[in-house]
Image (cartoon, rainbow, N blue to C red):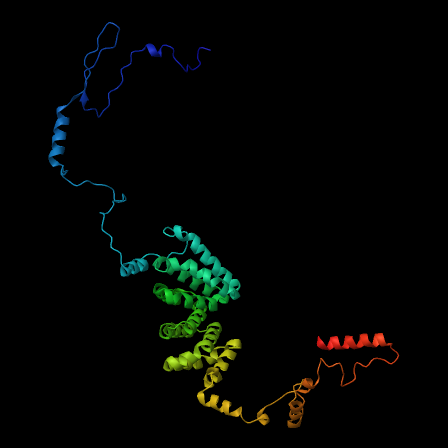
Amino acid sequence: MNNRTVLWDPNADKRNTTLRQPKGLTITQQSAPSSSPNTTPRDETPRLSSKSLVDRETLVANSTLNASATEWYPKNIYTPSPVEVITSSVQKRLQIHRECPQVNNINNEGTEEYSPDLNRIKQIITTLTKDPGQFHDLIDLFMETLVPYLEDIMITSLVAEIIVEQAINSPNFRYTAARLCWTIEPVSPQFRAELHLKCKKQIDDNPDPKNVLPLIAELYIQLPHLHVYGTLLFKLFKKLLDIGGNENIKTICQALKLTGYSLEQSNKSELDMIFSHLRSVRNRVDGSAAFLLDSLYPLRASNWGHFTEESESESDDAGFDGIQSQVTYDIDGETLTTEEREFLASHINAEDEYDIEDDSDPDELCDPEPEMDEEIQEAFKEFVKFSGQK
């Protein structure tokens, strides 16, 4: 029991132990006697040594600090720029709009106050995508919602972007999109410029440019800017031809069937170059793309299905040749002879000889049976007469 380790010494508090002074201490203090109830402590205020004073004087003499220096602050702290007088102009707003990132969300900052109207515009576009037949019913509401913002370049740009992207992503909306643009353009030059910029941007940046071509073709046909959208058409034709592939060639052929006649009138030399390029890639396509490409050459040779003035005059003269120039078919699709046509012509008004109001029946179809009594016979005649009037 006496050899066990003592964890706590009850006499430790009674020992007078002096603490060791720190090694780096430069401040001298007078040692104070042990405190006792009968002694008064002397002044223990620390005093600087002569060595500390010399070090401070050297530091001040060699310092590069300047009391008149400008105030320093970290670089990540925002400093408000001086207030400038902002002047607004159409050119400046266009420049700012092109430099700023495009707005892709109608709820972004700056469009909160327009969100209800923009949501309505998007809902109308969605409805027209699903049911293009409602165009005439919804176009007035669409324009009524858009007209207050026609001078706002941000809103017109956003509406143009919504229409273009929806037409590219939804083939069912392409024709309706061109009709919407045709309705908006005459009352909004800003929309006209923004629409062209959005289409050009899609041609340059869209990863699948063949989806852009049908929309450009519709805009070329419906909008009165043949040169503007014709240039975009040829740019897309060349881009898709350089990429190649059955789907791209098929898309080009479909667009040419729609726009070929107008392109032939406005820029025949460029169209000749496109056809020359198509001939060079004929051996590299197959399937439906090859079929469409082969059908394109006779279509162009026939003036894209449009009649010339000479052919129209010839068709007009042919109308005066009489009945011999006509071709008539019977119910089985067989051609009728001249005698058969004359017979039909002579009896075509035979029904006019039959007067419904007349009580008599030339063919005696309603003669009652002789064994009927007079009342039944009269009722039967009334029934036949009533059936003929119906």
Q: Is residue 156 left or right of residue 307?
A: left
Q: How many marks?
A: 0
Q: Percent position (x, y) of residue 279?
A: 44, 82
Q: Is residue 221 left or right of residue 335?
A: left
Residue at (50, 78) in percent of width and height: 292
Residue 243 shows in this picture: no
| Closer to us: 116 or 42 | 116
- Which image quadrant is residue 87 in? bottom left
Residue at (31, 11) in percent of width and height: 15
- Which image quadrant is residue 333 in? bottom right
Looking at the image, which residue sits at the far right? 371
Q: Percent position (x, y) of residue 183?
A: 42, 67
- Which image quadrant is residue 375 in? bottom right
Q: Percent position (x, y) of residue 95?
A: 29, 60
Does 171 sit above or below residue 41?
below
Does 27 sit above or below residue 305?
above
Q: Which quadrant: the C terminus? A: bottom right
Q: Is residue 59 left or right of residue 273?
A: left
Residue at (37, 82) in percent of width and height: 269
| Closer to us: 235 or 157 | 157
Does 100 sit above or below residue 251?
above
| Closer to us: 1 or 200 | 200
Q: Percent position (x, y) of residue 223?
A: 40, 71
Residue 367 shows in this picture: yes
